[in-house]
Image (spheres, coloured by chain):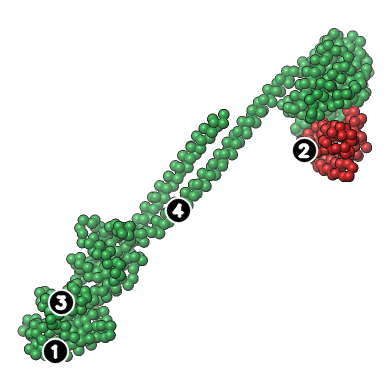
Amino acid sequence: MIGRDKFILSFRGRRRLLIVVIAVVLVELLSAAQYYFTHNLMEQELDKRAEMELTTKAIITKGIFENSERFLKSHIMEVKRNLVHPDSLVGIMAWTLKYSPHLKGCGIAFNPGYYKDKEYLYEPYALRTDSGIQCLQVAGERFDYTKDGFYRYIQEKKANSWVGPYEDAYLKRKLVSYAMPIYADHGDTVAVLGIDIDTQNLGDTLNSRHIYPSSFDLLLTEKGELISGPSDPDLQKKVAEVVDVINDSTFKKTWIKEGRVCVTTYYDKEAGDELSIFYASMKEQPHWQIAVVCYDDEVYGSLFKLRIRLLLLSLLAFGILLYILGRFARSEEELKRTTLEEERIAGELRAASQIQQSMLPRSHLRTDDVDICGSLVPAREVGGDLFDYFIRDEKLFFCIGDVSGKGAPSAMLMGVVHSLFRAFTAHENDLVKIMQAINIASCRGNDSNMFVTLFMGVLDLPTGHLRYCNAGHERPFVFENGKWEIVECSSNLPIGLFDDMRYVVQDMQLPPDSILFLYTDGLTEAKNKERKQFGMKRTQDALDACAGQQISPQEILASVSKEVHQFVGDAEQSDDLTMLAICYI
Amino acid sequence: MKTTIEKLEDKYLVTLVGELDTAAAAEVEKTLQPLYNTNGLDVVIDCAGLEYIASSGLRILISILKGAKSGGSKVIMKDVNDDIKTVFKLTGFINIFEVE
C-alpha cells in the first residue's frame, strides 16, 4: 500500500515537474528572444556610435591636415623670396613652427649642390624638441634626402602631397609629411618644402578619448598601411592584428551607413572575446582611413550580465514555485488521505448502524394481550440506547436502557448488554437474579466505568401483574384511570458500576387498557437552539394531550415525537431518542 | 466548561463551572485524571457553578469515586444544584457520593 502510494506520488510529482520544466523552457525561450532583439538594438546603437566616433576623429584629423597645408601654402611665397638668403630660411621656419604645435618639424630640402657655398646636400630644418625649437642642417652623411624623406617622394610625384608614413633616418621616428615642390622662375623644381608630423602625436590625439574602455583608434593609409594608433606598448600586438584583419580580404566585411562605414569582426583568442572593427576612408586627400576597434564584452557586457542575473533570478523563482507546488501537493495528498480515511470510517459506521437496527425487535407488535410500539433514533450513526421485548411462557419481558455517552463506544456496550438481557431472560424469570447477573457480567472488564441505566420489567400476561426494576433509569409514565402518572421506583444504581449491588424489585398491577410509556433521557433532555431542554413538564403535557381518546401506542409515540421535533426545531439532535409504549389490553 | 484542581493539606479541591456534557467530558477527564488515585486524600468537588452533568460526566465522577474508595477516602460534592440533586436521587448516585 505504501509502495503504491509512493508510486502515485512520484507520477504526479513527475507530471508537476514536467509542467514546471515546460514553463521554465517557455520563459527561457521568451527571455532568449528578448535578448536577441535587445542585442540587435544594441548593435544598431553601436553602429551609430562607431560612425559618430569615426566622423569626429575624421574631423579632428582633417583639421590637422588643413592646418598643415595652410601653414605651408602661406609660407611658400616668403620662402621663395628668401631663397637667395639661405641662412634666413631656417629662421622663417622656426618662427612659424612656433605657432603650429602639432608639427614636429619643418624643412626645405634643396636639390643637391644648389648652393655653391653650402654643403652638397643642404636641408635647413627647424625641429620641435622638448626644450624648444632647434635650427639644424639635417642633411649629410647620416641622412641623404635623395634616398629618403619627403624630398624623394615629391621629386617623384612633382606635386603637393602627403607622404608617408616612413621611418625618418635622422629623427628616428615614424613621420608623415606634407610637402610641396618649390619652383624656380624657370619652371624646374629647385627644392621641396615640407612639414613633418610625428605619427605618435597623431595617434595620441586620435586616442585621447575612447567610446569604450578598451577601444582604440587607428589611422591607416589608403592602402591599409598603419600610420599610427595608441601608444600603449601592450596594445601594439593587437594593433598589428587589427591591421592585418583590415587588409585581409578573407574576413567578412559588411557595409553600413549607406556604404560609408565598413564593419568586420574577428575572434581575439588572447582576450577570449569578439572584436568589432569599424573603418571608413576620409573623403579628402590623402584618403586615409580611420578605424575604431571595440570589444563585444564591453559593448554587450551589461546585457549579458543582465541576462545571467535574470536567468539566475528566474531559476530561483522556479525553485520557489516548485517548492510551493510541492507543499501544496503534499497537503493535497494529505487531505486526500484524510478524506479517504473519513470515508472509510463513515462507511463502517453506516454498516454498524444497520447491524444495530437489525438487532432491535420489531417496532410494532400486537397480540391479544398487548399492543407494543417502540422507536429508537440514534443521535449519531450508532447509539447507546437500547430497548427490547419478547414474549415467553405468557410473560412479556421488556427493557429500555441508556449507555453512558454516545457513539461507537456506547454502541458496543449496548450490544453486550442487549445480548446479556436476551441470554439471562431466556431461562430465568426472577428479575432480581436477572438484574444481578447482567450487572456482574457488565462490571467485568469495565475499566472505563461505563454504566448503563436500565429499566426492566416482566409482565405476567394473564394477570396483569408487573414486576419491575429500575437501575438508575428515567421513571416511566403509566396511563391508568384516564390519567398519566409517574411510576414510583426505588433508586438502584445503574448497571456496570459495582458488582456487589443488590437490586430492589417492585410490583405493580396493570389494569386493562393501561399504557406504560418508557423513554430515555434523549426525550427529556432534547435541546432546542436556545439550549433549553424539553423537560419532564413538556413530556407530561405531550402525554396528557393523548389522554382522552382511545389512543394506540403507535399514535402516542407519533404524537410525542412530533412535539419533540417541533420543540427542537433546527438544532442538532443531542442524544439518542428512544421511546417504548406498552398497552395492556 | 472550566475545571480547576487545588491540592490542599488534607484534600483535593476541584471546581467545576459550566455544563459537563459529552463534548466537554473528554477535556475534563484529562484534567481530572490525576485524581483517580488520591493516595487516601479526600476529594471535594465544588459544584456551585456546575449547571448540568451528562452521563459521560458521571462516568468521570465514578472513576474518581472508585479510586478514592480503594484508598479509603471519600468524594464530597458541594453545593450541587437542585436539578443535579434530583438526578442523583433518581439514579441512586446520592447513596454513593456524599452530596452537600
Using the image as rendered, state which of residue A371 and residue A405 is in the foreground.
A405
**In the picture, which quadrant includes the C terminus of chain A?**
top right
Separation of residues labelled 2 and 3 (CA atoms)? 115 Å
Residue drawn at x 33%, y 71% is A209
Separation of residues labelled 4 and 2 (CA atoms)? 57 Å
Q: Is A207 rendered above or below residue A379?
A: below
Separation of residues labelled 1 and 2 (CA atoms)? 128 Å
Give the residue at mark 2: B30
Colour green belongs to chain: A
| Amino acid type of the residue tagged 3 in the rendering | Gly
Give the residue at mark 1: A86
For chain B, give the colour: red
Counting residues from the N terminus, which is met first, the one under dot 4 or under dot 3? 3
> Mark 3 against mark 1, which lies toward the viewer?
3
Residue B47 seen anywhere in this rendered image of the structure: no
Counting residues from the N terminus, which is met first, the one under dot 1 or under dot 4? 1
**In the picture, which quadrant includes the N terminus of chain A?**
top right
Give the residue at mark 3: A149
Give the residue at mark 4: A310
Counting residues from the N terminus, which is met first, the one under dot 3 or under dot 1? 1
Question: What is the chain letter for disc 2?
Answer: B
